[in-house]
């Protein structure tokens, strides 16, 4: 019997997948201070809009970023609640690390 992942589990998996590519990490880094237009992202990352759009789509599917259209431009910003979900998931490992001491794995 195969167990279907919960919605949170799916969002966490897609979030990790989205953050596993350096270009997408660079996008997140640029957006952590402010909302940016796609043209600004292209300029900062030295990428064409067509190449960047694939990465932005992946980040949107993982619900890590929001987009809004203003005129002919699309502006992107971080979806901070989704980062909180990932952070809380990782915090569980930190919490358990205090329970289990580090092992000396000398070989």
Image (tube, rainbow, N blue to C red):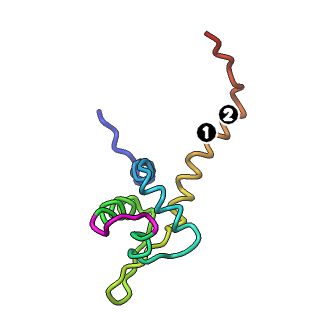
Question: Where residue 33 is drawn, which disc sits there?
Answer: none
Q: Quadrant of the C terminus?
A: top right
Q: Which residues are magenta?
A: 44-50
Residue placed farthest to the bottom in the image?
Answer: 71
Pick the residue in front: 92 or 66.
Answer: 66
Q: Secondary structure at mark 2?
A: helix
Q: Is residue 102 above or below residue 93?
A: above
According to the picture, the residue beneath numbered tag 1 turns out to be 93
Pick the residue in front: 101 or 26.
Answer: 26
Pick the residue in front: 95 or 18.
Answer: 18
Asked if residue 9 lies in the magenta stretch, the reply is: no
- Residue 22: percent from the left, percent from the top? 44, 51
17 sits left or right of 85 in the view: left
Callout 1–callout 2 Cβ contact below 8 Å? yes
Q: Please tell me which residue is depicted at 56% across the width and 66% down the height of the picture.
A: 32
Q: Quadrant of the N terminus?
A: top left
Q: Secondary structure at mark 1?
A: helix
- Residue 85: percent from the left, percent from the top? 53, 56
According to the picture, the residue beneath numbered tag 2 turns out to be 97
30 sits left or right of 73 in the view: right
Q: How many marks?
A: 2
Residue placed farthest to the top in the image?
Answer: 107
């Amino acid at each position: 019997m195969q167990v279907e992942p919960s919605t949170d589990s799916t969002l966490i998996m897609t979030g990790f997948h989205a953050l596993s590519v350096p270009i997408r990490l660079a996008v997140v880094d640029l957006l952590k201070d402010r909302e940016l237009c796609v043209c600004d992202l292209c300029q900062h990352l030295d990428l064409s809009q067509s190449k960047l759009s694939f990465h932005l789509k992946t980040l949107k599917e993982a619900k890590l970023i929001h987009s809004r259209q203003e005129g002919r431009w699309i502006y992107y910003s971080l979806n901070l609640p989704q980062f909180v979900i990932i952070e809380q998931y990782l915090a569980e490992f930190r919490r358990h690390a205090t329970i289990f001491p580090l092992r000396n794995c000398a070989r």
